[in-house]
Amino acid sequence: MPMDPMDAIRTTFFIECDELLAQLEEGLMAMEEGSADSETINSVFRAVHSVKGGGGAFGLDPLVRFSHVFETLLDQIRSSQVEPTEAVVATLLRAADMLADHVSAARDGGGVDEARSEQIAAAIMSHTIGGSATGAYEPEPAEIEGIDFKPQMISLDLPAAEPAADFDISALLASAAAEPAGEAVANDEEGGWVVHFAPHASLYAKANDSALVLRELASLGEAVITVNDEALPTLDEMDPAGAYLGWTVRLPGSVPEDDIRDAFAFVDEDCDLEITREGGAQAGPDIAALLAGAADPAPSVDEPVDLLSSLLQGAVEAPAAAPVAVAAPPAPDKPFNLMDLAPHVDELTQSAPSAPAPQQAANAPPAPPPPQTIRVDLDRVDRLINLVGELVINQAMLAQRVMESGAGKATDVNLALTDLELLTRGIQDSVMAIRAQPVKSVFQRMPRLVREVGEATGKRVKLVTEGEGTEVDKTVVEKLSDPITHMIRNAIDHGLETPAEREAAGKSAEGVVRLTAAHRSGRIVIEVSDDGRGVDRVRVKAKAIEKGLITADAQMTDEEIDNLIFAPGFSTAASVSDISGRGVGMDVVKRSVQALGGRITIISTPGQGSRFSLSLPLTLAVLDGMVVTVGDQTLVAPLTTIIESLKPRAGDVRPLGPNNFVLKIRDAFVPLIDTGAALGFGKSKFDPTEGVALLVESEVAGQVALMVDHIQGQRQVVIKSLETNYRPTDGVAAATILGDGRVALILDIDGLVTAHRKAPPRADTLAMTG
Amino acid sequence: MISETEPLRLGSNLSLDQAGPLREALLTRRGSPLCVDASDVERLSGPCFQVLASARLTWDADGQPFAFTNASPAFENGLAQLGAPDWTRPQEDFLP
């Protein structure tokens, strides 16, 4: 069922908001670093302005009010009235966090911390010149260079019977400065503005409203508004979603042109717009109007217009239209700039290569083409990935059938199959690349976390990030946030010292937390390092002994002691801190990371800091596995868990108690698990010397040897969820489909070990040799 | 007389998405004099204004009286800002 158009716009708005907030954060971080160039400040301003604009269209009052206060200060910074000092930027960063909260509240229907919002708004106003004047939303002269929020709509039909409860234009109308215009005084001032405005149907389809635009214009000064209904059909012929009316608005000449244009900031692509001085002098050429084919006064969306010729004509005529006579009104503030047109000319000439371009346009330097992107539902991509997974399986099945048919390796069929395999692998890689995302989306949430944890602990922290562009499958990106959050909380709370302690130790008062991402050996490695005090090994060891995790006389390497912090139930904090603790220890982080096929380790140097290293597979859709046989079943063991494989000798297997066995590997004994028995389909006799032992690393019992019958080989397999298709099963993480069409279970090593511990095999099923 | 006809009462929220229902409601009254009660209107969007404008035109073409009564301040204000402040002025022809 198609999504309600209003909901679709709303969804698009919030997607755009996320991007704008990321842009805001990025810009503010750059400003914090001292790069207060106009481009950065403009991008920050635009982000807030666009969030406000979109929020206004949806009647999100608290968000609009807050962003207006925020935007006012940014505007003053932009116009160099306010210096972006460290204190100002710190306030802006807090404001960005608050704005993100407002957006989340608006999206999820929750509330925001009003007191905090007020407090931050007050802090912003304290930096703003004439601060108290910014409490209410009013249209203001913002020189935005483009619209940032452009909801993309496909359908032009508004739902007739389903009122969109969330859409509230009145909020903005009500909050706009009320300027009674009922009996507007005629403006006969020479040189006054004449604005011709004719919306297209697309304007309404994007949830914009001509009434709102006119209201904004009316608020700029004494406006005389007349409606042009020449194109209006009778009721039975009209489409309620169409646009048939145009308006002429006369405004005093004293109104700045930019203010007038600002009223059209969100609609200028969806209307015919002409802004002229009374007496015929046209203001700066309006590209949107030119592009929309302004020659046709009839507000028609679908009518084909010769865009190129309109544009080029406009480009040539516009300078000539500028006032030249002495008595003429002052020239418009915004001079015609060919550079503005260049990208459009470039774009259009591509579609009409034979059209002659004017010399000016030809001389303009070529603008770099913007990267083309499309938004696609994740479901569609997932479906494609699934289908490609099926293709990989099918290709394997085909290869197996051909092999079984006895066709020689050098036959044409086999050569073609090899090509098919390469092609399939190519498709799989490309499809996976579609879903790959840079870790930036996760990294961008961290500066806020660092600020908040820093504030809560009274520590000064600087976050340095590297490798944000490192790409990883979306399924993995989503899982990164929690472990990284926890590692950073831990680094600040436990790793970094207080400013006083740091200074006493000869370090700078500000601690540094470094967050990096990189690809290494087909995996993504995320590191969180700090320059704090490092792990207090004496304390850690004492705590581990106290908790019974190790014996008092345990001989451990420094690395082993450091890694004790991942032991279940370990916490060195005297009380569970609500900063890094939150009631869960690093053991939970480690377990969740391992559940994803990842590893987490810590390396620490006393006095110099610690480094957490998190390694995860690049995707959760395919897995490198060791394909093994147990009984008549084929199983897959994740390659990342396997340390080595060996054929046990008779003397190396020793009984341990009535039901268990251990395997001697070099100088150590490890538990030996009969995989088949643990899963309930083993042979009746268990003879370790006839099989192969896979030495694997498990979380619950360290190294464990799994007995299997044979190793078939290593293979990349497509993961199919067993939970979705069947039900969760102990010891089995997922399933895959093999070349012969059979389902092979993918082992969950920890689950298997746990299952084995719960229900040890009966002694009578074992036949020990030697 | 127009005053004797059952008035069509406009909803309070004449937002973008109400243009369709409003047009339907008006069309059902076509062919006879129409009095539109705007006392509840708190908001008037461009598309709804357009539908009302088309209705005036249609009734005019049909030679039928069409008038607004009890216009709320918000409706009056909305009309003024959409360039039609005179719609609600008493029209001699239509008055009882």
Image: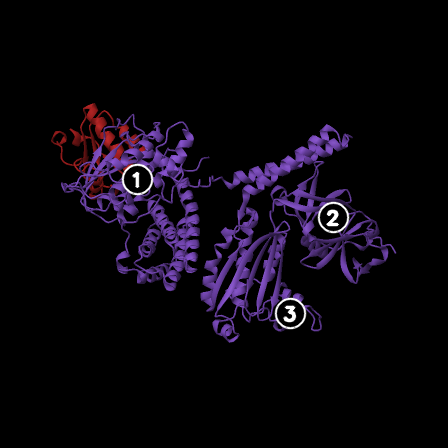
Chain colours: A purple, B red
| Local secondary structure at mark 3 | helix
Quarter occupied by residue A264 = top left
Judging from the image, mark 1 belongs to the subunit labelled A
> Which numbered dot is residue A680?
2
| Structural crowding at the residue carrying mark 2, measured as other residues with C-alpha within 10 Å and reported as few (<14), some (14–19) or many (≥20) | few
| Structural crowding at the residue carrying mark 1, measured as other residues with C-alpha within 10 Å and reported as few (<14), some (14–19) or many (≥20) | many
**Kind of residue at disc 3:** Ala
The answer to whether tags 2 and 1 share a subunit is: yes
Question: Can you tell which of label 3 and label 1 is closer to the viewer?
Answer: 1
Q: CA distance from mark 3 to mark 2?
A: 37 Å
Indicate left or right for A614 with A184 as reference: right
What residue occupies the far bottom of the structure in this picture? A504
Judging from the image, mark 2 belongs to the subunit labelled A
| Local secondary structure at mark 1 | loop
**Kind of residue at disc 1:** Asp
Q: CA distance from mark 2 to mark 1?
A: 67 Å
Which residue was labeled with disc 3?
Answer: A544
Residue A679 seen in the current view: yes
Quarter occupied by residue B30 = top left
Q: Residues at badges 3 and 1 in contact (C-beta under 8 Å)?
A: no
